[in-house]
Image (tube, rainbow, N blue to C red):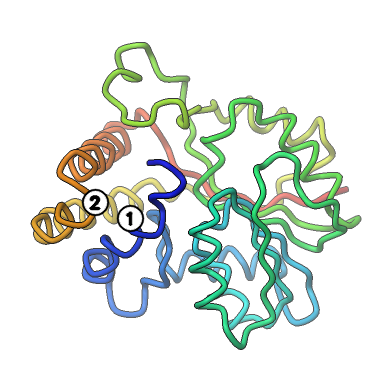
């Protein structure tokens, strides 16, 4: 998906995404996380009034706006897509949210009490370099809350099947824990959310198929087919254990 296609893509999928989640669980996230999971992760990370939060790869910032409204933090969302940030700014009216358009890395220097990276760790080939910057942007005792897709790197055959495979860089859990330790981040909590995310992927597939005619009219048949192909692969891999989804809170020592 090209950067200038982000806004129409978000708008085209809005109705299907709303229908795919249980009532109260959709907060304009562009991922498999439910609202309850987002809030629980934010609370475990210590997000509260007066805490400064940096949200990397925020997209339209559905989770960020939700967390800010629920928990009363101050918030900076960063994303490379100008159209996504435009939507985020429009929908954050009245909230203490700021947004920047920027590629990541580099990331804003901070210091921040919490850094969020939800559902996009897989897009970074050099994870240790990214984690080093995140650690440097945190206050002492600050927390990094993130999700990751855990597993061995994709094979050549798997990369052929996965749309936008150049943004899919899986990492084994042991490697991720080693990287975190090297940059001074200590895991305080982790939870496997593979099953719940597989269920959401399946629900999204059904919703996209039900609304296929309208979605295809807005973004094109090919984009819809690639969207479905990617979701089906994630569903299969999560079901088979090829990939695990894990949420973490790590603290800067």
Mark before the other along the chain sequence, 2 or 1? 1
Percent across and percent down for residue 207 are: 17, 60
Q: Is residue 190 visible?
A: no
Percent across and percent down for residue 109 are: 85, 51
Residue corresponding to mark 1: 9
Residue 228 disc label: none
Category of crowding for the residue at label 2, using alpha-carbon neighbours closer than 10 angstroms: few (below 14), some (14–19), many (at least 20): some
Q: Residue at x 75, y 41 (%)?
A: 106
Category of crowding for the residue at label 1, using alpha-carbon neighbours closer than 10 angstroms: few (below 14), some (14–19), many (at least 20): some
Numbered disc 1: secondary structure = helix
Q: Residue at x 47, y 32 (%)?
A: 167
**Residue 27 sits in quarter:** bottom left
Q: Residue at x 63, y 70 (%)?
A: 43
Residue corresponding to mark 2: 219
Q: Residue furthest right?
A: 140
**Residue 174 sits in quarter:** top right
- Quarter of the image with the N terminus is top left
Q: Residue furthest bottom?
A: 94
Decide if residue 230 is on the left or right side of residue 82: left
Decide if residue 185 is on the left or right side of residue 17: right
Which residue is at the front of the view, 216 or 225?
A: 216
Percent across and percent down for residue 211 are: 12, 61
Q: Is residue 69 above or below residue 31?
A: below
Numbered disc 2: secondary structure = helix
Decide if residue 234 is on the left or right side of residue 74: left
Q: Marks 2 and 1: CB-CB under 8 Å?
A: yes
Q: Residue at x 78, y 34 (%)?
A: 181
Percent across and percent down for residue 190 are: 59, 49
């Amino acid at each position: 998906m090209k950067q200038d296609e982000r806004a129409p893509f978000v708008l085209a999928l809005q109705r299907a995404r709303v229908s795919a989640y249980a009532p109260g669980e959709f907060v304009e996230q562009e991922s498999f996380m439910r609202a309850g999971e987002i809030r629980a992760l934010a609370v475990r990370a210590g997000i509260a009034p007066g805490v400064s939060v940096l949200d990397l790869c925020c997209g339209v910032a559905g989770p960020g706006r939700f967390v800010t409204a629920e928990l009363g933090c101050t918030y900076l969302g960063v994303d490379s897509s100008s159209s996504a940030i435009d939507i985020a700014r429009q929908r954050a009216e009245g909230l203490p949210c700021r947004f920047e358009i920027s590629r990541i890395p580099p990331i804003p220097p901070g210091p921040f009490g919490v850094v969020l990276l939800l559902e996009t760790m897989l897009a970074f080939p050099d994870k240790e370099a990214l984690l080093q910057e995140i650690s440097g942007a945190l206050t002492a005792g600050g927390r990094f809350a993130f999700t990751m897709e855990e597993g061995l790197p994709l094979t050549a055959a798997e990369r052929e099947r996965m749309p936008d495979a150049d943004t899919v860089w899986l990492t084994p859990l042991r490697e991720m824990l080693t990287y975190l330790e090297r940059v001074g981040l200590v895991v305080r909590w982790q939870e496997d959310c593979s099953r719940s995310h597989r269920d959401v992927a399946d629900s999204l597939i059904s919703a996209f198929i039900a609304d296929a005619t309208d979605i295809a009219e807005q973004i094109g048949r090919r984009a819809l087919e690639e969207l479905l192909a990617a979701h089906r692969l994630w569903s299969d891999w999560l079901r088979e254990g090829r990939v695990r989804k894990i949420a973490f809170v790590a603290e800067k020592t």
